[in-house]
Image (spheres, rainbow, N blue to C red):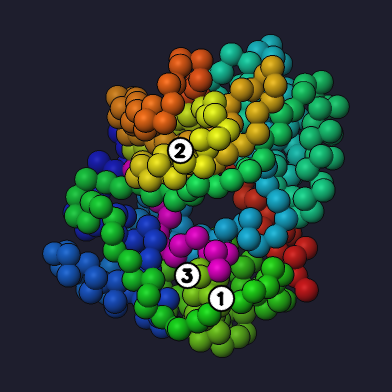
Amino acid sequence: MSQSTGLDRLDRAVVNAFQGGFPVVAEPFEPAAEALRERGVDVTADELLERVQALDEEGVLTRFGALINAQEIGGAATLVAMHAPEERFEEVAEQVNAHREVAHNYEREHPHLNMWFVVSVADPDEVDRVLADIEAETGQETYNLPKQREFRVEAKFLLDGPVEDGDVDCSALGPDVEAVDRDTLTPEERDLVVEIQGGLPITATPYADVAEELGVDADWVRRTIKRFDREGKVRRVGVIPNHYALGYTENGMTVWNVPDDLVEEVGPEVASLGFVTHCYQRPRHEGVWPYNFFAMTHGRSEAESEARIQEVRETMERYWDVGDDDWDTLFSTRILKKTGIRLDERAEANTR
């Protein structure tokens, strides 16, 4: 039984409403509660704060705060596939996971490429070294699949209940800021990124508490987070749910061999499907991996997952005649490693 079955009406409203667009003001739970009341959910700021604290403690949320876009902070990350022979699978997994640069590693259903991991480095030139080391240690070839184009990264997981369309957006509340045309971070910005990467304090005044921890002005913290949101260094501010706890246990990575001249048209259409959480163009590997388009879907049951995958296919078929050999779905069967992406090292390397 998933934890989502134990969530009441207010819990579900909180999860649906605030997976993005949380206010960046001195006391953000006040306007957030008001936004819920406007949608028929009777709650005070104190009650909302207590509920977010409880959801976090119970593991329904992985954290509350700003979701950092690591790509815009510095360094690089890439998706890598490889074959781990069945009789050596555990040994190979251990060898791969021993590399601190490997942030996530999943076993996926595929007749050949059954191990998929993410390599995160502070220096983009280090990716080739890490992969060469893994190949030397495991005796298995790696297939680097870096993101060539991003169409969507918005992992929202909605529940049945109030605000089921998840349309609450209070991100306009807060300081009036302008984006800065600068790729690097200042030392103060680096310290802020490191401080908030694991979440904000779940208190009535989270931004002021971060400021006190850093020894800086609270208005500077709010202005910088708001500016990071505008610049893309922060994807969104809000609650970050544990999708497994919400019942989204079916994790399907659909992959497609989209004609190159159609990718630019197909990408935005697939990305517009609300249940698609990640959507990218990645390179093919001739003779081994014919797919150049990835769309990640999640479902709360096998039937829901299959229906969503079929909807992706129907969207694709509006653009070209999709054959059975033109696509596949790789379901994850086991999490082999899941750690942070060492954002502190990537931010440090990009600080000037």
Q: Earlier in the sequence, mark 1 or mark 3?
A: 1
Q: Name the residue carrying label 2.
A: 266
Looking at the rendered structure, the kind of residue marked 2 is: Val
Residue contact between numbered discs 1 and 3, judged by CB atoms under 8 Å: no
Q: Residue at x 37, y 78 (%)?
A: 173
- Give the CA separation, mark 2 to mark 1: 30 Å
Question: Is residue 139 in view from this perspective?
Answer: yes
Question: Is residue 313 in view from this perspective?
Answer: no
Q: Residue at x 59, y 45 (%)?
A: 149
Q: Residue at x 34, y 38 (%)?
A: 247
Q: Position of residue 153 (x, y in %)?
A: 49, 49
Marker disc for residue 3:
none
Q: In the rendered view, does 195 fall on the left or right side of 327? A: right
SS of the residue under disc 3: loop
The C terminus is located in which quarter? bottom right
- Give the CA separation, mark 1 to mark 3: 25 Å
Q: Which residue lies furthest to the front in this view?
A: 261
Q: Residue at x 30, y 71 (%)?
A: 32
Range drawn in magenta: 231-246
The N terminus is located in which quarter? top left
Looking at the rendered structure, the kind of residue marked 1 is: Ala
Q: Which of marks 2 and 1 is nearer the N terminus?
A: 1
Q: Is residue 236 magenta?
A: yes
Q: Name the residue carrying label 3.
A: 201
- Name the front one of labels 2 and 3: 2
Q: Position of residue 131 (x, y in %)?
A: 79, 35
